[in-house]
Image: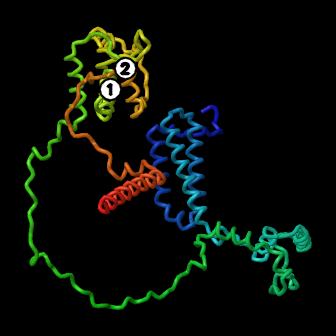
Amino acid sequence: MSSVQTETSQVRKPKLTKQEHLNAYNSLRQRMKNQLKLAAKGEGSDVLRQNIDELKRLYHALETEKVRDTKVHLEDSEVFKEASEFAALNARNLRFGDGGFSLDERDVLKRLRKYAATDSSILTDIIKEDEQGGGEYGEEDDDDEDSYPIMDEYTFNKVNWLKLGVLYHQLSKKPISVDFLNGPLANEKRRATNRTRNVDDTRSGRSTTARHMEASDLAQDEEKNTAYMVRLVYDKYLKKESDEEVNFFKFFINPHSFAQSVENLFYTSFLIKDGRLKLYTGKSGAPCITRVTQEELGQIKLDSSKVLSSHHVATFNYDVWQYFIQELNLKDAFLGHRDELEDQIPAEDLFEDFGDEELRVRDDEEEADTSNTSTTSTFEEQI
């Protein structure tokens, strides 16, 4: 050989395949799952650092080999998320001894005094003590006031104890105890008493059987059915065979019965609502009623938006009924008179309509008539 090669050529590692990268992340994930027990105890700080170093090494390999596969990067993100959850679990259960450091009791008390100080002058004194004490972990002073018990009220009031209590209940897991809700600890024993038994008196008594009901007993009376009465009123109107408009008041008023007039008005409202009859203002200006034609029904089915409808509340009393009978000179009912027993006003309601003075005057008149009759009869006997 003419020349000696002194430089050593670097041996390049072969690139890992996609499956090899995924297997490396899966092995790290499985290792962290097996180490969750240590994190639950707060003893996983060392293994956490090793896992993070391993995760950095795997990601560095991806960057070196310029891997652009999204599935591999997704696997890296998921493993990194699980490592973060592992660190959070370990931090929640971390103990100060495991971390290699501890808190100074004297320093904790000073920080609590700062937090619960009630006056700005107290804060100034605490800051001066920190400066003179040489920092956070200074030497303890034997003459420190924290080493002496609180004996006077002024020293006691330097601390906002309510603020400290709220902080304690926020950070601790103990429930808030309320002393005035504490009941008696010992339950009162219930005394045993002799209980009287209920005597069965059904054997000596008379037994009865319920009456057998038939289907006809449960059927409703057609005369009290509203739908039946509405059809009856409409049939009576159709039998008139009158295509002309009818005065609204002549249509439903029965001059022989105020109760049936109210009923006819009620049934007429259903006929108007169902589109059998229509109520409008006639040529004379009075409200009139006529039948809805088939052409109008067809137009309503085709386009109901052109139909004008309104809602009215009718007020009808006894005085109005008498007024229209005289005004329209009504002799017979357009819908006819129904021969049925009508409701009567109770006798006690009739007495309530009269005042006390009117009843007293009537009683005096009756007594006067009685006295006159007795005087006349006595005079005739003397003659």
If the image is split into quadrants, where does the C terminus sit?
bottom left
- The picture places residue 353, in percent across and down from the top left corner, at 42, 48
Q: Label 2: few (<14), some or many (≥20) within 10 Å?
A: few
Q: Characterize the local packing of mark 1: few (<14), some (14-19) or many (20 or more) Cα atoms within 10 angstroms.
A: many
Say which quarter of the image contains residue 238. Answer: top left
Tag of residue 35 = none
Residue 328 tag number: 2
Secondary-structure class at tag 1: loop
Depth check: give the residue in front, 238 or 217.
Answer: 238
Q: Is residue 157 above or below residue 171?
A: below
Relative to 83, is 259 on the left or the right? Answer: left
Q: Distance of mark 1 from mark 2, alpha carbons?
A: 10 Å
Residue nearest the viewer, comparing 378 with 262? 378
Label 2, secondary structure: give it. Answer: helix
> Does residue 256 sit above or below 30 in this rendering?
above
Residue under label 1, please give it.
253
Q: Earlier in the sequence, mark 1 or mark 2?
A: 1
The residue depicted at 46 percent of the width and 50 percent of the height is: 358
Residue 127 in the image: state x and y as whole percent: 89, 69
Q: How is the image coloured?
A: rainbow
Depth check: 141 or 39 in front? 141
Residue drawn at point x = 35 percent, y = 53 percent: 348
Residues at marks 1 and 2 touching, judged by CB atoms closer than 8 Å: yes
Q: Amino acid at mark 1?
A: Ile
Residue at 47% from the left image edge and 88% from the top image edge: 186
